[in-house]
Amino acid sequence: MKQRKFRTALGVIFSTFEMTLRQNVIDSFILFTILVQPILIALLAIWMLRDQAANHAIFIVIGSGMTGLWSSLLFVSGNSINVERWIGTLESLVASPSPLPWVILGKNLAHVTQSLVSMILSYFLAALIFNLELDIVNPGVFIGSLMLTIVAFVCFGAIIAPIFVMNPGVQGFQNAMEFPVYILCGFLFPIAMLPEWTTPLSYALSPYWAARALHGTSSGALDLPEVLFSWLMLVLFSVGSALLSAFLFRVMLRKARREATLGLE
């Protein structure tokens, strides 16, 4: 019985993943968020540091890709439930046999996976336009960090989506949440450059540990124990986010059924 349920869940997640990718290809806002904006950030940063670009190029490329991941998580994955409400399909989606969290998981996985394209494009554009050598020092460990980053971001997105539905006031700060995370998580420069009082805030955000692992494994700045510690933090944040999102989904659906406000803003 459990095996059958597991196969059903994978089927729902994969189907949603595939359909979401198809929809995103023709959405100009999503394409700009996950492709154009990170590339512009990478090219601008490399141009500004052109005298030192050879020393910092891989850091900038990875960091710009992280900005695409976070923007996609915040604006696209965060609105993954609200979009269904706006187009009038949320009630049907909730009433379907497939649990809503499975559907949102597939959507978030598609958004985060598609955002990785920006990192790849930034890599090749930086190498082509600025004639830079971009070597990843520990490619095997880097790929492991990338996989854990995807999991952590998908789980984090599963928290944001129900919060935006239940608290529209929080969504009002959506734009204001983008650049502070770029800064606090050290996407484009180390958090050591920030005031000390901001350090605990950085440690409390899973994107920081993702950026730390990706930057450290691409440049070789971290030794293996430090990388494993970052991995451990990503796993802990992923598990905590998954448990919290499951609770938030239960609260959201129970509240919607009791108040009959599922389709209302």
Image (tube, helix red, strand yellow):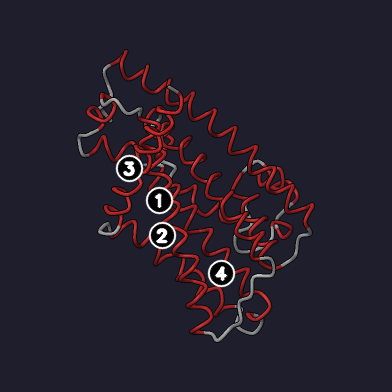
Specify which label sits upstream in the sequence, 1 or 3.
3
Residue 174: give its label. Answer: none
The residue sitting at the left extreme is 88
Pointer 4 with pointer 2, Cβ within 8 A: no
Side of 260 where 231 appears, left or right? right
**Which quadrant is the C terminus positioned in?**
top left
Disc 1 and disc 3: Cα gap in Å?
11 Å
Say what amino acid the circle numbered 4 marks. Val
Mark in the foreground, 2 or 1 = 1
Q: Position of residue 58 (x, y in %)?
A: 62, 71
Residue 50, picture quadrant: bottom right
Residue 16: give its label. Answer: 3
Say what amino acid the circle numbered 3 marks. Thr
Check disc 4 and report the residue beneath it.
61
Say what amino acid the circle numbered 2 marks. Ile
Side of 153 where 165 appears, left or right? left
Disc 3 and disc 4: Cα gap in Å?
30 Å
In front of the other: 223 or 260: 223
Q: Position of residue 171 (x, y in %)?
A: 40, 39
Disc 4 and disc 2: Cα gap in Å?
14 Å
Pointer 2 with pointer 1, Cβ within 8 A: yes
Q: Secondary structure at mark 3?
A: helix
Q: Please tell me whether residue 245 is drawn above or below residue 56 in the rendered image.
A: above
Q: Secondary structure at mark 2?
A: helix
Disc 2 and disc 1: Cα gap in Å?
9 Å
Say what amino acid the circle numbered 1 marks. His
Pointer 3 with pointer 2, Cβ within 8 A: no
Check disc 1 and report the residue beneath it.
111
Q: Secondary structure at mark 1?
A: helix
Check disc 2 and report the residue beneath it.
34
